[in-house]
Image (cartoon, coloured by chain):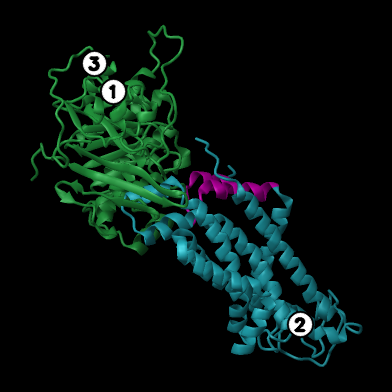
Chain colours: A cyan, B green
Amino acid sequence: MSTSLSDIVKTDRARIFGIRTDLIEQFVDTLQQDLKAKVGLVIVSVFILAAIFAPELTPYDPMAQEYGVFQPPTLSGAHPLGTDSYGRDILSRVMYGARISLAVGLGAVLFGGFFGVLIGLLSGYYGGWIDDVLMRAVDVMWAFPWLLIAIMLVAIFGQGFWNVIFAVGFAYIDDFARITRGEVLSVREEEYILAAENVGLSDFEIIFEETFPNTVAPIIVQFTVLVARAMLAESTLSFLGLGVKPTTPTWGAMLGQGRTFLTQAPWISIIPGILIMITVLGINLFGDALRDAFDVKEGDEA
Amino acid sequence: MIESTDPLLRVRNLRTSFDTDRGVVSAVDGISFDIKPGEVYGVVGESGSGKSVTALSIMGLIDSPGVVEADAIEFRGEDISGYSDAEMRDIRGGNISMVFQDPMNSLNPVMTVGEQIAEVVRHHTPVGESAGFWRELSRKYVTGTDKESDSWQRAVELLDTVGIPDPKERATEYPHQLSGGMRQRVVIAQALAGDPDLIIADEPTTALDVSVEAQILNELLELADEFDVSVLLITHDLAVIRETCDRVAVMYAGELMETSNVQELFNNPQHPYTRGLLQSIPRITDDREWLDVIEGNVPDLINKPEGCPFQQRCNYSFDMCDKPLERHRVSDDHIARCHLHSPEVDTAAHDFDTEATGDRSITSGDSGIIADGNGGDDL
């Protein structure tokens, strides 16, 4: 007897933070039918696993230097992806780099998402002057190029892991605020919100218990899109030397450091570059699948 | 304890207006009525006559730019018109609950129906389960309500009471998995969950098809009777009123035109507007080729005419119609706001037959004016 994933979801009415089970079903269907979605899922899974299990999987310490500098990638050799100018194993470094990318990507988006969603919820639900004040503030943020904000924040607070997360995430507050607000504006007009007021729920309860779960779908999609962008942003900052500590392996920093030797040892830059490209592509494909699954407005089947 | 003759809800001179860019819209313009315990009170009127705004005004749910003023909104003898939001939250759902027009939209799509009912039980009845914010949030979206808990059991019981088959199973389903009639039953169960004294049903069957409509209405009324709940039934359907209500108020342009017990209203309507409404109902025995419609449109609520709001459309209008309306008692339980009933007006001269359509004649011609604020009288 074979049970597919969608059967399990169908029979077991699992609730996953307010996402309707039929949407999850739809997502599983999309995954099964859509090749792009599968590719996205595989890339994202490999990336996450590599990041999580980097210490177990890497053959070398990413910081360890060897005399054999500039060894080209030889798939059968001791250093499958070669070594860099200090003789450090590139394979080990990109796997550790994946951790930074993942942490910064998720951390920045969680940071921006938390404040953005909060602003969007309050702004959309209350309207009036609260909306005016919050959204004008968000408009001001939106008017600045994110890189300028990030450079400014790193200049103020200095380099470092948390500061990069803060600097990148700060720039995403406005995206989340805007999307959430738009969604809340339509949800708050629904009769079930009036009905919730009518059974005696407070504003606070209505905002977080009734409204927010109904706005979750587009926020999740935005989440995946921005994780990819945040990883690129981290690479950009590291490339510019504004990222985390220079010795820490990150893809952006590796790409930047390899630039000097581009003609002699192109793999030092090309390998992290390709990885950035593939990962961002994978996350975007995955996000597209989520969008396909969630974008369908609730049909009135019954 | 309140006497059973005391009104459960007493509304005096309720005025709700909205300050818009074009001017002040008087959506509800000085209405008064009483609902007695156990009574089914109908409010009938055209779209835009202010029926729903009346309901929301009572519940304290008119948002800015709306302004609600009233001489009194008394619930069980206590004036709730000045209640704070926190105090009103206890009233809503716990003492007065509402059933809305469209069951497709009045249930939250991301929560199971059992959850939505159990929530009301926890908020308004002493089941001894915390209804604190974080507890509720995790209960609703992460763990689900404990299936053994009192609130869940009560939710299942209520679903059973409103006639949902297999309530245990249904309670774990989402609104989109239920049909329209089922959903409206769920909404009724939710309205009953807080053990209220009054249910305001705002066109509860408009969105349902006719066969389900009768069922749902009957169930609502049976349950109201069983749970000893009064019902304020808002509708535009006179047939529904006739079948279900004890007393009825006819609303037009934010004002009540006529109130009466239901038989008398249908047998002996005393306001030209009510007559117009009744004549515009198609009858199966009709040999009329055209329905008698009421010509014209509802007046602009921003610049309402002086006096009677119905005067432009009224076949009987005469020189007194632009004077302020007064309440005229037609019979014991029957009041009309129309100058034709003023003692100094000779109705015959205006071709208005006071015994027109009725098969029940009225007992007396005592159309005395009732002084304003005279307790216990509607309009």
The residue under label 3 is: B348
**Image x and y of residue B299, in percent:** 41, 35
Which residues are the magenta region? A4-33
Q: Chain of mark 2?
A: A
- Left or right, B39 with respect to A241, comes to left
Disc 3 residue crowd, few under 14, some 14–19, many 20+, Cα 10 Å: few
Q: Chain of mark 1?
A: B
The label shown at residue A254 is 2
Magenta stretch: residue A16 in it? yes
Say which quarter of the image contains residue B100: top left
Disc 1 residue crowd, few under 14, some 14–19, many 20+, Cα 10 Å: few
The structure residue drawn at horizontal position 61% and vertical position 61%, both measured from the top left corner, is A222
| Numbered disc 1: secondary structure | helix
In 3D space, how far apart are the residues under numbered discs 3 and 1 (Cα atoms)?
32 Å
Q: Are marks 2 and 3 on the same chain?
A: no
The residue under label 1 is: B243
Q: Are marks 3 and 1 on the same chain?
A: yes
- Amino acid bearing label 2: Met
